[in-house]
Image (cartoon, helix red, strand yellow):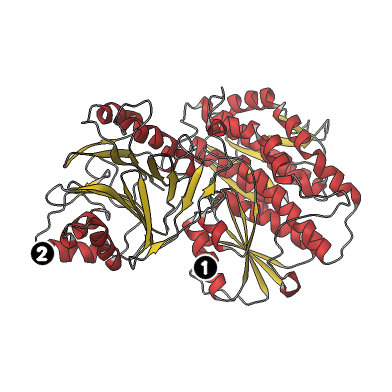
């Protein structure tokens, strides 16, 4: 959460000598990480010039462009953790003399103790943030060398941070990381720091990924990377594969809609090169000794956790290996039993989610082998696992995850088949044929968008939704409910349909809408009975069914028809229908679908 950008450029192109437009453009690209307030600080000739606003980056833009021009600057877009979103709590934060400016992503967990000490020493705090202790500590330790003061400060800090710091008397930007992503873009006479590659891409594809406990010092056209002991490090320069045009909206009203419609191609990309001519699944995960694996532990959060549940069903069914699925935030604190015989699989779009990362480290410490299913190349999780499967879904900008989720489902399907083949379990040829047909089937669902839009309009004022499914459709019911909640702010709950009669059925009335996933699988007749139960109690139903299945016609006229497909792949097909439903409902309600309130794309705090 929170987006940081910092730029030191000799000749900022197209912007005169001014970095402000570059920083603002970067903040707009990072705005998905947090968007409740924003700020900027430029350094010119021994003076700091800054502006902060409550609200969106667009509101900062004018103020930023009016500042004294400069070729050195830092900026921030915030997702509040400590202190309400307002101008004072917006970053950058300053020291008592306004000589030091700090932008920060992460949480300083011991900030109250540090603040008390600093206040006793006479430091005056103006904000309610944890970040402000950093600027005052740097002030305390500053003795003419900014990086040394930063290093001393960070020795005292408990928690996570990605920071960029300016001092008015030094032509440099000091950047450091522990637990929050930082990427360095290496250009010609210009270097750019950001929390995410999307902000670096317009300038350069050459990047260096900072590890924890590393810092970068940007000076005129140069950069130096050090560890927190001050040792200079030589790090490899990587090349980003994504293009800048991949992160544009391309005529779609929202990124979320664009990303929903990109799914046939995204799934194709997840599959590419992974099933060979002899129908063997090829995943470059040889570093893992699968002969040792007796159990699989999956950790993830939110939408990614739902893909973990699908993975459990598939791996247990196809590869016959027991699987447990945990929320990252629970796993890390429950002292789980983990051994060398476990394979820990982290599923994460961003590869930066703090809880998933902590769960990964916990399992590693306890001896498990580790595998990542990740979208963002070079992300922290991808660098810490023993082996990984990249989704290749392309950049996902909409805060609500869509294409990354269906690509996760595709990847876990491949993983189940891979594990089965490793155990010499024969997989029928048809399965592979059906996988190849997936992108086309998703396209067929997208062609239903007009019908789904009609249903969305009819139900846009609904106050409560149930999403119900059985077997592999249960996690998809959870995902459908989550998409509606987060994009439309409508109360929605997902349940296993068979569980409904144990309590939830009490809520059924003619205002609660039940969305049933009733596509054909081995629980089909059971789910029809569950629909009857709801209907009999006056509940209204939206049904997702296969093709021309008319068995539900006496229960509802609000039917979303999706193509038939083998049971194991139906989660992908059904998801797309529910994503469209959520998107259209949110859009009818006039919500900023790409940036729903209170959320952020990459949750790098606990
Ligand atoms: C919901 C959503 C979140 C994320 C969760 C994990 O649409 O996007 O629930 O799935 O924050 O994020 P990643 O996958 O980046 O670990």
Whether residue 102 is visible, yes or no, is no
Where is the C terminus found, in terms of image quarters?
bottom left
Q: Are marks 2 and 1 in contact (CB under 8 Å)?
A: no
Residue 13, percent from left and from top: 38, 29
- Against 113, is 248 above or below? above
Whether residue 550 is visible, yes or no, is yes
Residue 473, percent from left and from top: 71, 48
Q: Quadrant of residue 367?
A: bottom right
User: Which residue shows up at 16% across the image and 42% down it?
Assistant: 46
- Number of residues whose C-alpha sits closer than 10 Å to that of mark 1, classed few (under 14), some (14–19) or many (20 or more): some
User: Which residue shows up at 81% across the image and 46% down it?
Assistant: 524
Q: Is mark 1 within 8 Å of ligand 1?
A: no
For label 1, the residue is 361
Mark drawn on residue 121: 2
- Number of residues whose C-alpha sits closer than 10 Å to that of mark 2, classed few (under 14), some (14–19) or many (20 or more): few
User: Which residue shows up at 37% across the image and 25% down it?
Assistant: 14
Q: Secondary structure at mark 2?
A: loop
* Distance (Cα) linking label 2 and label 1: 37 Å
Mark closer to the chain start, 2 or 1: 2
User: Which residue shows up at 59% across the image and 24% down it?
Assistant: 457
Query: Which residue lies most toward the left here?
Result: 122
Q: Is mark 2 within 8 Å of ligand 1?
A: no
Observer-nearest of 224 and 345 = 224
- Against 386, is 204 above or below? above
Q: Secondary structure at mark 1?
A: helix
- Against 438, is 147 above or below? below
Q: Is residue 116 left or right of residue 541?
A: left
- Against 196, is 305 above or below? below
């Amino acid at each position: 959460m929170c987006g940081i950008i910092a730029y030191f450029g000799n000749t900022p192109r197209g912007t005169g000598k001014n970095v402000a437009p570059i920083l603002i453009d970067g903040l707009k690209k990072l705005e998905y990480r947090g968007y409740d307030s924003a700020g900027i600080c430029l350094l010119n000739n021994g003076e700091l010039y800054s502006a902060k606003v409550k609200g969106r980056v667009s509101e900062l833009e004018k103020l930023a462009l009016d500042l004294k021009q400069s070729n050195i600057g830092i900026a921030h877009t915030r997702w509040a953790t400590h202190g309400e979103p307002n101008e004072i709590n917006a970053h950058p934060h300053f020291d008592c003399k306004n000589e030091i400016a700090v932008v920060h992503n992460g949480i300083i967990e011991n900030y109250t103790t540090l603040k008390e000490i600093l206040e006793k020493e006479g430091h005056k705090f103006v904000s309610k943030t944890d970040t402000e202790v950093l600027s005052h500590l740097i002030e305390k330790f500053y003795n003419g060398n900014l990086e040394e003061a930063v290093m001393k400060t960070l020795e005292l800090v408990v928690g996570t941070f990605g920071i960029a710091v300016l001092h008015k008397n030094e032509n440099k930007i000091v950047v450091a990381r522990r637990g929050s992503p930082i990427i360095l873009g290496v250009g010609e006479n210009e270097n750019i720091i950001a929390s995410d590659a999307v902000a670096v891409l317009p300038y350069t594809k050459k990047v260096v990924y900072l590890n924890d406990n590393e810092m970068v010092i940007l000076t005129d056209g140069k950069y130096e990377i050090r560890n927190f002991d001050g040792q200079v490090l030589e790090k490899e320069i990587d090349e980003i594969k994504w293009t800048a045009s991949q992160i544009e909206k391309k005529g779609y009203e929202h990124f979320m809609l664009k990303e929903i419609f990109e799914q046939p191609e995204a799934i194709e990309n997840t599959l590419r090169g992974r099933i060979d001519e002899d129908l063997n699944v090829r995943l470059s995960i040889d570093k893992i000794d699968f002969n040792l694996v007796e159990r699989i532990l999956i950790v993830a959060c939110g939408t990614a956790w739902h893909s973990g549940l699908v993975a459990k069903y598939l791996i247990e069914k196809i590869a016959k290996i027991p699987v447990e699925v945990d929320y990252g935030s629970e796993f890390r604190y429950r002292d789980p039993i983990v051994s060398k015989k476990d394979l820990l699989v982290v599923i994460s779009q961003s590869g930066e989610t703090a809880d998933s990362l902590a769960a990964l480290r916990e399992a590693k410490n306890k001896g498990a082998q580790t595998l990542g299913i990740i979208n963002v190349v070079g992300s922290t999780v991808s660098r810490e696992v023993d082996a990984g499967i990249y989704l290749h879904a392309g950049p996902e900008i909409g805060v609500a995850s869509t294409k990354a989720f269906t690509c996760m489902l595709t990847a876990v399907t491949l993983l189940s088949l891979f594990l089965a083949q490793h155990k010499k379990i024969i997989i029928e040829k048809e399965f592979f044929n059906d996988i190849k047909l997936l992108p086309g089937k998703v396209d067929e669902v997208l062609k239903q968008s007009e019908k789904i839009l009609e249903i969305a309009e009819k139900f846009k004022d609904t106050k409560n939704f149930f999403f119900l499914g059985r077997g592999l459709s249960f996690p998809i019911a959870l995902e459908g409910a989550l998409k509606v909640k987060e994009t439309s702010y409508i109360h929605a709950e997902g349940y296993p349909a068979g569980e409904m009669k144990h309590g939830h059925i009490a809520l059924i009335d003619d205002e609660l809408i039940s969305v049933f996933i009733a596509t054909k699988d081995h629980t089909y007749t059971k789910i029809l009975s569950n629909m009857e139960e709801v209907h009999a109690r006056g509940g209204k139903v939206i049904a997702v069914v296969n093709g021309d299945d008319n068995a539900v016609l006496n229960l509802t006229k609000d039917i979303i028809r999706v193509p038939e497909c083998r049971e194991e792949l139906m989660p992908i097909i059904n998801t797309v229908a529910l994503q469209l439903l959520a998107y259209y409902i949110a859009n009818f309600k006039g919500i900023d679908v790409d940036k729903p309130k209170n959320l952020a794309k990459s949750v790098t705090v606990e």
